[in-house]
Image: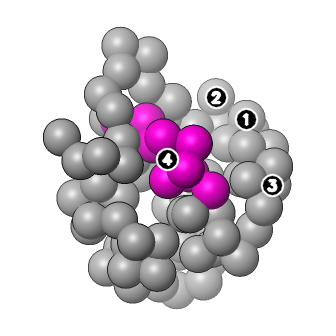
Amino acid sequence: MSPGMRHSSRPQPGLGIAIRQLREKKKETQEALAERAGIAIPTLSHIEAGHANPTWATARDIAAALGVSITELAKLSEKHE
């Protein structure tokens, strides 16, 4: 398992959906976002699919790479839960 995520018995699929929507809105690939966020592509893929939860540090890095605050990302994820 990557250090930027943890498997959970309570995954947060809304967060993954929010990340994917923001990424697609910017017409970005998983590869480009993962590189800017400093995480592995499989890590981002698992998070977007709702199979794993990012650590807080990884969530902040992803939000920054998407050009949004962690608060904005959290609000968007709540809409998908």
Within 10 Å of the Cα at label 1, are there few (<14), some (14-19), or many (20+) other Cα atoms? few
Which is more toward the observer, 74 or 2?
2
Q: Quadrant of the C terminus?
A: top right
Which dot marks residue 78?
1
Residue 2 pos. (x, y %) = 23, 47
Marks 3 and 4 sit apart, C-alpha to C-alpha, by: 14 Å
Look at label 3 and name its amino acid.
Glu
Marks 2 and 1 sit apart, C-alpha to C-alpha, by: 5 Å
User: Tags 2 and 1 in contact by the CB under 8 Å rule?
Assistant: yes
Is 71 situated left or right of 17 in this image?
right
Residue that badge 3 annotates: 72
Quadrant of res 63: bottom right
Look at label 2 and name its amino acid.
Glu
Within 10 Å of the Cα at label 3, are there few (<14), some (14-19), or many (20+) other Cα atoms? few
Residue that badge 2 annotates: 81
Label 4 sits on a secondary structure element that is helix
Q: Which residues are magenta?
A: 52-60
Whichever of callouts 3 and 1 sits on the residue coming sooner in the sequence is 3
On the question of residue 29 being in view, the answer is no
User: Tags 3 and 2 in contact by the CB under 8 Å rule?
Assistant: no
Marks 3 and 1 sit apart, C-alpha to C-alpha, by: 10 Å
